[in-house]
Amino acid sequence: MVDEAHHLPVEVLEEVRLLTNLETAEEKLLQILLVGQPELDLKMDSVELRQLKQRIALRSQLEPLTLEETQGYIHRRLQLAAAEGHSPDLFPLETVSSIYRHSRGIPRLINTVCENALITSFARQAHSIAPDVIEEVATDFRLGVVHRVQSNGGQGRNGQALPAVQPPQDSNEVWQAVKTLLQLHDYLQSARARDEEETPFVVSRGNQKI
């Protein structure tokens, strides 16, 4: 399972495709799940990844929740948190409507808004979350502010041109760095295991050591 797969370079995704070649006469040895933002679809449509795209057996896309689904989602989360029966009191319908408007039905944003709204209301010793609390949380998190990042550089505070952020020139370096980290992890694990084997086990009984 590869999370945030939309950040992977094309070369790494091609390595993932090669992993799908591992198979026996009866079955595949690996089932690979790529999870990412909508940018992953754009990357998979590129010419370089057409072979990987042809091997996709199942696609699924999580659409934003509707207002009704948002209300059910919040109530279900509260039910799992042992607040069953109190969810309509904690999050009235007008509050849920405000949450839906600011989160646009995206579950990750719903979680963020609700969590901080609960903390704010607890600090105010309120037994119900009012819509104005949601407005305050949305303002603090700047949920209504969206800027497009300029790819050709922008201007600094004094009007000076800022250099554009360039991607790595050699994306193979990213893959090599990942493999190096994995090798380092394996080395540290083996070194730790050797140290544990070489450390004598000492049992104290009074002033004697066994």
Image (tube, rainbow, N blue to C red):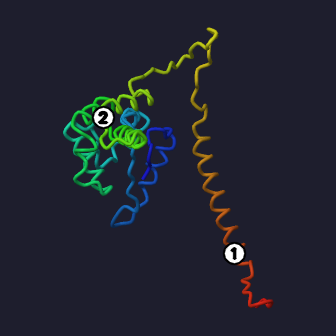
Q: Which residue is mark 1?
A: 196
Rendered image: mark on residue 130: 2
User: Is residue 59 shown left or right of residue 4?
Assistant: left
Q: CA distance from mark 1 to mark 2?
A: 56 Å
Give x and y (percent) for residue 127.
31, 44
Rendering quarter of residue 48? top left
Seen from this angle, which residue lies furthest left?
Answer: 68
- Nearer to the camera, 5 or 23: 5
User: Is residue 98 shown left or right of residue 148?
Assistant: left
Give x and y (percent) for residue 203.
72, 87
Q: Check disc 1 and give the amino acid type.
A: Glu
Q: Check disc 2 and give the amino acid type.
A: Ala
- Nearer to the camera, 131 or 19: 131
Q: Secondary structure at mark 2?
A: loop
Give x and y (percent) for residue 155.
58, 12
Residue under the point 58% across and 24% down: 165
Q: Secondary structure at mark 1?
A: helix
Residue under the point 60% across and 55% down: 182
Seen from this angle, which residue lies furthest top?
Answer: 159
Quadrant for the C terminus, please. bottom right
Q: Earlier in the sequence, mark 1 or mark 2?
A: 2
- Judge whether residue 50 can be spotted in this image: no
Residue under the point 74% across and 87% down: 204
Rendering quarter of residue 136? top left
